[in-house]
Amino acid sequence: MLQPCVEKLQGKSGSLDHGKFAFFLEYECDSSVISIAYFGEISRTQMANIVIGCDALICLWFLTHTALLSYWIKRESRDGEKEFVQMTDFAVRVGRLPVVESYDQLDELAASLSLHIAEVVNHEQSVFLAAEKQTSAPADIVSINFAERPFRNYMILLKIDQLVQEGQRYRTKLRNEKRAVKRSNIERNIERVREAIRVQTKNYLNSKEGRGGNGLVKNAFVVFRTMEGAARLI
């Protein structure tokens, strides 16, 4: 088998390209037992069972270790929530807000909400025993932030804007076109765009946002200066 390769490359100079040739050796293992130091001879079936058992033990160890890690992480998280103060201990989410139709009304809503919350907090009983020793009043508010409602029909308005621009392009072509056939085709396209705008406008006016909906804001996040104020409001 090697002789043809030697004859083919004989007389050629340069490096040998080993990627052109591959040699394979194959033999059948007919040994029924395997010798292992300090253990003696065992059969191939027993060896296979030992390997399978080791794999099972490794998988079991991995699953047990993963479960323990998950338990320890969750326990550490629970202990941390009990022992440490977090931002959520000072904040309260307020829903069912009055309808706000413009951003100019947000300042007025924030002021009215502050007065209402202060009245509610001052009429509630103390939650923490050390509330009387605090230097800040429970009704002191750091900030009020509003969460706006998702504007789901934005794509309708975007489509209307695209149709308006398309109609403007057709009207520009109509002013510059002198041939009667071309003008007739452009006028049909203009009418098609107008009808599409009427349909999209009707869809928007029938939507919740088009009818005014429930206002621009959905929730208010009120951050108190003390945990006592948040606890009283809840």
Image (cartoon, helix red, strand yellow):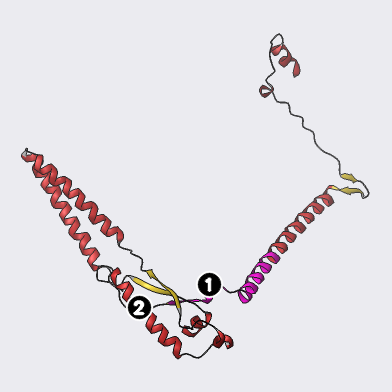
Residue 85 placed where, x, y %?
Answer: 58, 74
Foreground residue among 40 and 79: 79
Give the main secondary structure of the magenta stretch.
helix
Q: Amino acid at mark 1?
A: Met
What is the count of numbered marks?
A: 2
Q: Position of residue 217 (x, y in %)?
A: 35, 71
Q: Where is residue 41? Give x, y as percent.
A: 91, 47
Q: Which residue, given by chain and number where applicable, does mark 2 sit on? A: 111
The quarter of the image holding the N terminus is top right
Say whether marks 1 and 2 touch (CB < 8 Å): no
Left or right of 93? Residue 151 is left
Nearest to N terminus: mark 1 or mark 2: 1
The residue segment tinted magenta is: 68-93
Q: Which mark is residue 195?
A: none
The residue that label 1 is drawn on is 87
Q: Position of residue 43 (x, y in %)?
A: 86, 48
Residue 83 inside the magenta-drawn segment:
yes
Secondary structure beneath label 2: helix
The structure residue drawn at horizontal position 66% and vertical position 67%, both measured from the top left corner, is 73
Query: Any magenta on residue 133?
Result: no
Q: Does any portion of residue 153 appear in the rendered image?
A: yes
Q: Is 205 placed left or right of 78 in the picture?
A: left
Label 2 crowd bin: few (<14), some (14–19), many (20+), radius 10 Å: few
> Could you say which quadrant of the image residue 169 lies in?
top left
Task: Say whether residue 206 is left or right of residue 78.
Answer: left
In this view, 69 is above or below 100:
above
